[in-house]
Image: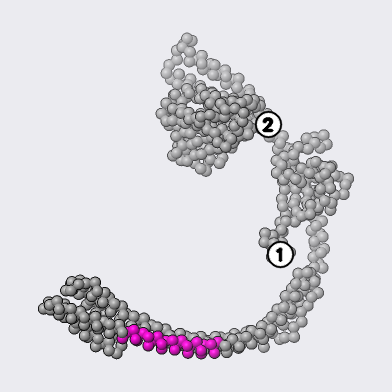
Amino acid sequence: MKIKNKLRLGFGFLFVVVLFFGVVSIFYIHDISDSAKVILKNNYESLSFAREMRTILDVEKLPLSETAKNDFDKQLVLQEHNITETGEAAATTVLRKAFRDLQSPKSDLPAQERAEYDARTQLRQIEKLNMQAIVRKNDRAQASVNNATLLLGLAGGFTFLILFSFSVNFPGFIANPLRALIDGIREITRKNYNQRLNFDKNDEFGEVAMAFNDMAARLNEWENSNLATVLSEKQRIEAIIEQMQDAIIGLNEKQEILFINTVAENILNLKEQKIIGQRADKFTATNDLFKSIIENNTLKSIKIALDGKELYYQLESREIIIPNLNSRASDVLDIGSKSVGKVYLLKNITEFKEKDEAKTNFIATISHELKTPISSIKMCLKLLADERIGHVNAQQMELVDHIRDDSDRLLKITSELLDLSQVETGNIQLNFVPSDPSVIVDYALDSVKFPAGQKGIILDVVKQPDLSKVQVDVEKTAWVLVNFLSNALRYSPEKSKVTINISEKNGSVIFSVKDLGKGIDEQYQKRLFDRYFQVPTDGQNKSGSGLGLAISKDFIEAQHGTIWLESAIGEGSTFSFALPAYPDKKS
């Protein structure tokens, strides 16, 4: 018999048993529900109506008010439509008569008191009848519950015996073949491709055994034929690695060297040693360069002297992740994948380094050469503006002013380029001295007072008292502050205010410059300190070279400080930098 038919018979039998038990349960539950429903719907409501009418008589004084009469009549009408017990109709009729006497305008107070007494008597009678009915129906419902409990217990016991017998005997038809199949699969995972299954059954399990045996045979063939392919691919990969112009080293998870090409051997001076299969720490103890490569995965560049030349290499490392076929359930973080080692790659960037140095030298040379003619142009402009050598008309003076502005801008750009060349070559000359933050601010303010006055901008200084000194290069720090102020003046509206704030927090002195300009869009803020980046303008403000903030960042970080920006459209911008406080003295 097929497994499908076995399952149909087994589950069909279970369905019949469960259906029988369910029908019996539903019958008795329905009977109990009907009894409870009658109790709640009829008798409870009659008791509620009687209670409401008695409450009206208890609360209201005779004669009853119109509101009380209406409320009493409303409850009495509901009671008249809810008569369910023998004698309840007669009591309700008498109650109606007593209520009419109560509200009759001809009745005097003694007659109304008698009518009230009669009404109370009938209300007690109605409550008594309904309470007796509730007790009677409750006894009947309890009897139904007891009968249901007995029958359901017998049916449940019979069903349990049948299901227990079924659960003990039937799973063996399924579990035993499955256990044999699982054992066979485990042998396959151990690469025992000679494992076979033998089921003496003409059902689906017999078909599974045939398919399993066929799979094991094919895996055995594949294993034998795939070994040659794997060896061929290994040789091809080794040839590719060997032909690479960059140095490459591979380690496994045990820090053993899997492969290393000739370029790497030359760089590390390991040509005459057998290192494949050896642990890396065997060589790092005597080879500082190898140790730096293995231990420092974030080296920007390495300068190596090789064959009488200085070569530059960029270090990159990649962790090799593969599926974790041997993962255990307890290794929650490793299930699915695992690391089998690392590959270290040394890219030869000598050509790019030389080009970068040539670019830096070119910038420094051309900037230095441009400063002399620009200074001569400024001197000529100053002479043109001097009336002692002749007068110029208004149009000519306007042209002179434009030339002066462009000359100042060009001189500023050349100065920034010279500073940039210092930064790129690492030749920033810093003269650290303990300095008063107020002196630095005053130095910067003197440089921008004239352009601030031309635009009517107020320079407001807010200083925290008892500030610590800072150990900085005063000139370069003031240069950064002047750059902040120049940008603030450029983008602030006329007759506005620029605030310079000096405060101390967490061992750092913070310098901030806040303007009331249009603000800077969030998409540009992250790139604002990048070299040559300029925020797009609306044409009303001349943009700079895009170097000022980049150089400012380098100057501040060279003094162990931090620099940042806070801005929002329509709310202006605040440029800030923080420098370590000098621990010895207060200003």
Q: Residue 226: x, y in percent?
A: 79, 65
Q: Residue 121: x, y in percent?
A: 24, 83
Residues 446 and 249: in front is 446
> Up-down: is 334 above or below 449?
below
- First to last magenta residue range: 129-156
Residues 105 and 580: in front is 105
Res 53 seen here? yes
Q: Residue 498: x, y in percent?
A: 46, 30
In the picture provided, is 59 more to the left or to the right than 515? left
Is residue 139 shown in magenta? yes
Which of pointers 1 and 2 lies earlier in the amino acid sequence? 1
Res 490 seen here? no
Residues 92 and 337: in front is 92
Local crowd at mark 1 within 10 Å, few (<14), some, or many (≥20)? few
The label shown at residue 107 is none
- The majority secondary structure of the magenta stretch comes to helix
Residue at the disc numbered 2: 426
Q: Amino acid at mark 1?
A: Arg
Give the Cα separation between the discs numbered 1 and 2. Answer: 52 Å
In the picture provided, is 167 more to the left or to the right than 118? right
Residue at the disc numbered 1: 328
Q: Amino acid at mark 2?
A: Gly
Quadrant of image for the C terminus: top right
Which of the colour schemes (rainbow, by chain, secondary structure, one colour) is used?
one colour
> Up-down: is 4 above or below 492?
below
Q: Residue 373: x, y in percent?
A: 59, 20
In the picture provided, is 222 more to the left or to the right than 443? right
Element on which disc 2 rests? loop
Quadrant of image for the N terminus: bottom right
**Residue depicted at x 74% and y 73%:** 185
